[in-house]
Amino acid sequence: MAERIMVPVPPKAIIPSRDVGKRPILETHHLGIEFGGLKAVDDIDFAIGPSEICGLIGPNGAGKTTVFNLLTNVYQPTRGTILLDGYDTKGLSPDRVNRMGIARTFQNIRLFSNMSVLDNVKTGLHANMKTSFLSSITHGFGYSKAEKEADERAIELLKFFNMEHLKDHQAGALPYGAQRRLEIVRALATKPGILLLDEPAAGMNPSETAELMENIRRIRDEFNIAVMLIEHDMNLVMGICEGICVLNYGRIIAKGTPDEIKNNPKVIEAYLGKKAE
Amino acid sequence: MKSFFNKFSGLKKSARSNMITLALCLAAFGFVTAMVATGNASRHMKSLLVPICINIILTVSLNLVIGFLGELSLGHAGFMSVGAYAACLFSIAFEETLPVMVRFPLAMLIGGIAGGLFGLLVGIPVLRLKGDYLAIVTLAFGEILRSIIINLEFTGGASGLKGMPQDSTFNWGFIAVVITLFVVMNLVDSRHGRAIMAIRENAIAASAVGININRYKLMVFTVAAFFAGVAGALYGHNYSIMTAGTFDYNKSIEILVMVVLGGMGNIRGSIISAVLITVLPEMLRGLADYRMLIYAVVLIAMMLLGTSEKFMMLRYRLAPKRLIKRALQERQNRKDEKEARKYG
Amino acid sequence: MNFLSNLISGLSLGSIYALIALGYTMVYGIAKMLNFAHGDIIMVGAFAAIVFINNLGLPMILGVLLSVVVCVAVGVLVEKIAYKPLRNAPPLSVLITAIGVSYFLQSLAQLIFGTNQKAFPKFIQVAPVHIGELTIKGESIVTLAVTVTIMVVLTLFINKTRMGKAMRAVSEDRQAAELMGISVNRTITITFAIGSALASVAGSFYGLTYSFIGPYTGSMPGIKAFVAAVFGGIGSIPGAMLGGILLGIIENLAKAYISTELSDAIVFGVLILVLLVKPTGLLGKKINEKV
């Protein structure tokens, strides 16, 4: 296990008042990555409180998904540090950092399409099931008990999103909205401390988006975890995020509460272009 | 009896399906044993029994790699050869000192362990490869193994290994088949199996939910190679001479054909196709010249049909389960109609 | 001196590998598939040449040229029948199909021509060249000259012509190329045609070097050429040339100084080593999977 590094919360971080004084669940220092000399993401600093809902917004191509890929160690940063619950995640594999407490969904849905909905969620429970290889090949040594517990836990999670009646369906055959929800359930099954959502509202109508907003709040409250989301739907972002980072050309151009962001001239410029002088 | 049925229907669908597969195998074993005991089996048929067991083990274990992990291994015959040589050398050394009841199970175990060790050995370096590269590297490993075996003294070199006891019998083969099926079917239906299939479905998502891809790839490679080694042990003790040439690339392709014909990820299908591919060429001697050609056509046709939507629709429409369901439904409908007319 | 002559025959063998490797690398780059049957096209070409020259009595050079036509037809046909329907299928299905096609060609050739090896006509006869104590076979020189010429022409074609540009575009991004009005199917067909033509030429020179051809003649050089393509960096045309030539030299030196029986094992060892140390090959570029 990597050494836990205690760092004071950077003063410039925006964190909801209830999380002040607690160790941030996730923080980055000067995080950056280059692809063939091009700085896709550069000098990213932020900290997220353990029960915060935080938004990452920015124009297309600003590097938002790249930040997620860095946070989940899909890419290794060329510079900077990521601290997950105080542990430096440098050089660890994506599965290892997931087990350390970071879970995500994908912009282009990545389900286990040919497996059932229930098995998708149970795959999410994988790392928290402790049955041995021997138990798996004999179906003895605690296999039945562990499977039963996993089934129960998976159904409990599916119920959270009103999906328990779909449990035997093939995941790839679900309607689009249900696939997005299933991806979130699967991520939650890994017992994360922070959940990263990559455009969770993409392709949803306003009523579905409203339901999603409610669900994200419920996730935070009932699982008591932090949520970070990339989203283009400003109603959603402004409606539920407590802190927002705005990214443009791979750099953070603004950080603050929704109200501060709305009135920030740099943000307006990034989205709407510079006013004619 | 009733309580057994209650218990049986209370089982998970996958567990029920596994029990049916094992029961069918047991029934087939009983039938064949009875045929042999009553003298209804020809010499020729009897000579096919051990090869059938060998091919079932090879097919089911390779299906674990291809059908469940979603990677192509072209070195299965190589692992088989390692198991065969290890087991046969052991049997030759202990032919005088150990009785066959002890010697042969030990030989199979040693064959399996030797195969599994090589699976692990090959698996470690090729872990980060996938797809085409992985396939070609397993092929390369298989060929290297064969060259090395031919160039070694104690393996009998190019002229082959002789003098192993003829220990392989249908009973031993059947026991090995049952163990293989038990282990592979259980593994697939477990948390480890879900992890393996998740890698096949979407490797990036699998690692995002905490699955260590390398570890599971290695696990599959080792388990599959273990059983290939067991099959090799059965093979080696079934003939009086064994040459490395048997375990070439063509043998690996033959196993691949059996997996593809039975259906990737379908264990019952693997068993059926292994039996078919072992028995049919012997039955249809006239087609011997066309065997390779038929294999090739099977590979191409299965892949093309598998992606053809029209064919998949046809298959869906003609699935026995669905047909039975529909027939029952229609009967019920007719009954309902009759009732309605009676009272209406 | 012995070393030098081994080096030169390695160079000539390597240039044959390079020709085959070019087909692999182009198809891999453009159709994103490993055409396992590519090696067997060599055998098809060599047998076609034998039929034209020995059975039909055509002039040797004409027979060799016509064999190129046969190979192009076979290559394009295979692509149309077996690979095109699988363009959006999982890579595993495509690979299995390609193995099936390879097997199909081999067993068909075996049915038609039998298992025995057939003598390949010496369609080019050049006197050996003597430089001091060193003797270089005439065939080696011709093989080398022809393959180098073909490689130069191919490089010009890829870099200077419209079709070459289309090929590069499809290999970069198939969808974007399609949106730009490039016919992806046509580009892939042409790639297969070129690859098969190169394989056919390679087949004739292989026949010239080894004098005998059998139904399985194509599979070993095919696999070795794939090793060469990976060695040089798959998808890279100069890489295929470099990889092929290096592999030919390695194989010949291994045969001369280590062991004839183990030379194949050594070639495969090279493949494994390359994939472990530098999976992108000598001249290949790294491709990041998009998440």
Image (cartoon, coloured by chain):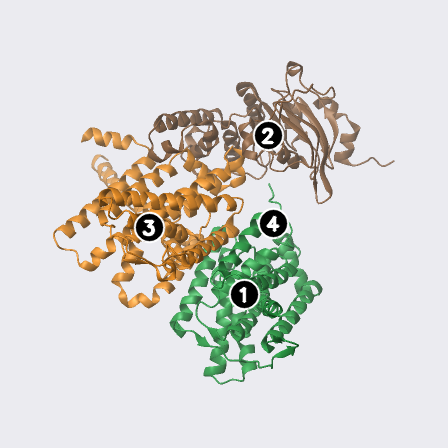
Chain colours: A brown, B orange, C green
The secondary structure type at the circle numbered 1 is helix
Give the number of the mark in front: 1 or 4: 1
Tell me which label, 1 or 4, sits earlier in the chain.
1
Identity of the amino acid at label 1? Ala
The numbered mark 3 sits on a residue in which chain?
Answer: B
Which residue: 45% across, 62% down?
A: C101
The reply to whether the C-beta atoms of the residues labelled 3 and 2 are less than 8 Å apart is no
CA gap between label 1 and label 2 equals: 60 Å
Q: Does residue C197 appear in the picture of this structure?
A: yes
Q: Quadrant of the C terminus of chain B?
A: top left
Q: Does residue B325 appear in the picture of this structure?
A: no
Identity of the amino acid at label 2? Leu
Labels 3 and 1 positioned on one and the same chain: no
Identity of the amino acid at label 3? Leu
The secondary structure type at the circle numbered 3 is helix
State which quadrant residue A151 falls in.
top left
The disc placed on residue A196 is 2
Residue C143 location (% of width, % of height): 60, 73
On the image, numbered disc 4 is attached to which residue? Answer: C278
Residue B51 location (% of width, % of height): 28, 54
On the image, numbered disc 1 is attached to which residue? Answer: C256
CA gap between label 3 and label 1 equals: 33 Å
Which residue: 49% across, 28% down?
A: A189
Identity of the amino acid at label 4? Lys
Is residue C130 placed above or below A1 in the rendered structure? below
The reply to whether the C-beta atoms of the residues labelled 1 and 4 are less than 8 Å apart is no
The reply to whether the C-beta atoms of the residues labelled 4 and 3 are less than 8 Å apart is no
The secondary structure type at the circle numbered 4 is loop
Give the number of the mark in front: 1 or 2: 1
The numbered mark 4 sits on a residue in which chain?
Answer: C
